[in-house]
Amino acid sequence: MNETFCNAADIFGEDVFNDTTMQKRLPKKIYQALKRAIEEGAELDLETADVIAHEMKEWAIERGATHYTHWFQPLTGATAEKHDSFVSAPLPNGKVLMSLSGKELIKGEPDASSFPSGGIRQTFEARGYTIWDCTSPAFVRHDEGGATLCIPTAFCSYTGEALDQKTPLLRSMQALSAETVRLLRLLGNDTVRSAEPSVGAEQEYFIVDREKYLKRMDLVFTGRTLFGAMPPKGQELDDHYFGTLRPRIASYMKDVNEELWRLGVPAKTQHNEVAPAQHELAPIYEKANIAVDHNQIVMHTLKRTAYRHGLRCLLHEKPFAGVNGSGKHDNWSITTDDGTNLLDPGSTPHDNIQFLLILVCILRAVDNHAELLRESAADVGNEVRLGGNEAPPVIISVFLGEQLEDVLRQLISTGSATSSHDGGFLRTGVSFLTDVNRDATDRNRTSPFAFTGNKFEFRMVGSHDSIAGANTVLNTIVAESFSEVSERLEKCAPGEVMDCVHDIIKEYAAAHSRIVYSGNGYSKEWAEEAERRGLPIINSMVDAIPALTSDKTVELFEKFKVFNRTELESRSEVKYEAYAKAMNIEARTMMQMARRDIIPAIMRYIGDLAKASNAAEAAGMDTTVQKTVLRKLSGLLSEAQAAVDSLEKCTLLAEAMEPGRSQAVYFHDYIVPGMALLRAPVDEAERFVERSYWPMPTYSDLLFKV
């Protein structure tokens, strides 16, 4: 088998207008001006932008690009783009100029009224602006339409409100950097100039055969199976987890990796996940806004590459009932401009006062804003994922591990910590296997927000959702904690600052220890314990959304200029409307599948079985089995038809309601249970209907035949 050899180091970033390319192509003065803009927030003048745009255009044309686009992230959860060619005014000789001006690089004007805005933009108020995010490098994307220069941008309305995921994220990063530097200065660090959140988003996904996918209306319209009986084997044996990649999947992943590397995405890890047909891809950590952009590139690449291989990538959080859903574990930490990870506890965390202060500040942030953090992971797909099959529970808690929990107990009981648990060595008992250092703490996969050595892993984010929202919240709530501590330290006498720090560490450790939990997050006992502790238990997306517009949230975001009240209220409306629309599509899809495909299939099987039963009875044969199956299927058929009729009545009522919270709540309280009532008899009937009659690929076909 001949394979083209690919050296990742040779191709990495070749389609990215990265720092190496900029140094090579830009005049030194222009390059330095751009670096100041990236690192210090300095503004670029139009003359400088013209030079950058020209060189970016020339480089992109060399890479085969004919068009450029402002690549942005509206409130749809996906990316958006409008393509313009480099073709400029015709010349007298019949040729054309190829150009990209500084003005075109910096600003675009998509139609803002056609994207979700929660009422900020009406149909007759169409103007919106995309603004170049120079901190995230432009790239050339090659696809079936040719090559396109993609320029990462923010997206704002004509009146200045953020209409996207990127703008609030950048604002929150500024706030976190400012408050981190302020705090570190008070702790005696005179050299730090900036800090940024470092993020790595592990991406889970399912891969199914595209031909089978196209035969499932529910997968095509909603991204998940609305019907489907579990096969005899699911994930019980855990034999898929970390198993050898099947040839077709291995070939697909090879192409995914190569494309991502060319686009500068540091794809690092790939493996089979627990559920059949489920997989994971994880990158190396990056600056938060670049990590957000790269995760969007990852999702796009996973889907487009699957198409070329005759496959379909499913990014829905729960495409199959009864097996694991897919998440996007958001690994978050804070890194200073000198490369220091502020969440690295060192070998003796009890002595690391700076780390302990930052740790308890994060505990305070998560405890005080648990509802908001829960909301940041609320989307329609997560509604059916959270709380089961290895997904985190809906109750926000923090896992610290044995080492840090012990340090915390010491701080609470005595006011100081004098020791830290050592992980020691792991000895296998095999003489030729090297003894290895063991981590000082185990992991807890049931924790929504877990400390994993030198970072926190927020495991609630959904697999198809943008990680921008969760990181915007994390950045801002931690900035608030840092701000409060700084205000207190600024009031301390110069020689008493460290005494004040010790007092704050003990105070925060005691006040916010209720959010710390190391046990089984799936257990009934934890739900009861969480309620006793006063922790919020928010089971649904519609119950989570109000946290966006609470007075506490508005005050938080307005203080750090991340959102204003109008932007928060608009996002609330967008989420209610998105939930209602998604549920309406699912309900309509279920009814159509049931009426056009499933009920007729069951009826055909019943009819043929009845004929065979009658013929057997006429021949004097025992037909007890046939009659038993007929009665069973007839009952399920009646149950399914009644459920369809009931669901349609509820859906018509829901559709007639005004968009907003009331409509979303109605969909949650009535349509979702109605869909469950329809699914139950259909899934049961699938177990009895002979295979050739069933009108669509089954779970066995989708999960095990790739």
Image (spheres, rainbow, N blue to C red):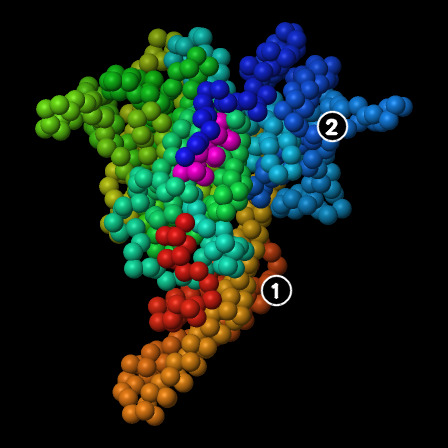
Q: Residue at x 49, y 43 (%)?
A: 309
Q: Residue at x 60, y 36 (%)?
A: 143
SS of the residue under disc 2: loop
Residue 329 seen in the current view: no
Question: Residue 140: x, y in percent?
Answer: 61, 28
Q: Is residue 29 left or right of residue 216?
A: right
Q: Is residue 256 magenta?
A: yes
Three-letter residue code for mark 2: Phe
The correct choice, above or below, for 355 with respect to 379 in the image is: above
Residue 315 seen in the current view: yes
Q: Residue at x 63, y 12 (%)?
A: 25
Query: Label 2: which residue?
Result: 86
Query: Label 1: which residue?
Result: 656
Question: Residue 321: x, y in percent?
Answer: 38, 56
Q: Residues within 10 Å of mark 2 (few under 14, many from 20)?
A: some
Three-letter residue code for mark 1: Ala
Q: Which residue is more in the foreground, 126 or 61?
A: 61
Which quadrant holds residue 30? Answer: top right
Q: Which mark is residue 698?
A: none
The correct choice, above or below, for 598 with respect to 284 in the image is: below
- Range of the magenta residues? 250-261
